[in-house]
Image (spheres, grey):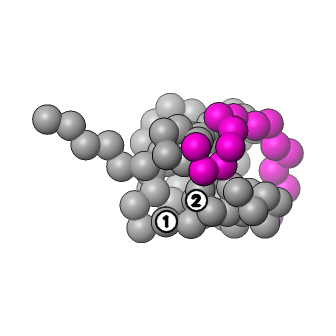
Amino acid sequence: MKILYFARIRQIAGKSSEEVDVPASVATVADLIEHLSARDEAVAAALAERRTLRAAVDQAHVALDAPVQGAREVAFFPPVTGG
């Protein structure tokens, strides 16, 4: 699965993307966050603020309880504001 990091999350994680093998026990975006955080301290710091964290599965915005089975891509980004 391809994992994408954007904006401030990319800066804190120190990378814009990575390819990961996701175990079958990872069922939701929240599970994926736990899995990624356990593998890498910088990613854990980047994804720590879950209250404001946004995610997309295969380019569709989703809640953190959305399933990830069969997904090709999951992206993480901070909230976006504009005017």
Dot 1: what SS? loop
- The answer to whether any part of residue 50 appears in the image is yes
Disc 2 to disc 1: CB gap under 8 Å: yes
Q: Residue at x 58, y 59 (%)?
A: 47
Q: State the extent of the magenta-drawn residues as a range.
A: 11-30
| Amino acid marked by disc 2 | Leu
Q: Is residue 8 left or right of residue 32?
A: left
**Disc on res. 50:** 1
Q: Can residue 28 be seen in this view?
A: no
- Residue at image position (51%, 60%) is 64
Q: Quadrant of the C terminus?
A: top left
**Circle 1 crowding by C-alpha within 10 Å: few under 14, some 14–19, many from 20:** few
Residue 29, x across and y down, in percent: 60, 56
Give left or right: position of 61 versus 41: left
Q: Give the number of the disc on residue 47.
A: 2
Measured along the vertical axis of the image, is residue 76 above or below residue 31? Answer: above
Task: Identify the image quadrant of residue 25.
Answer: bottom right
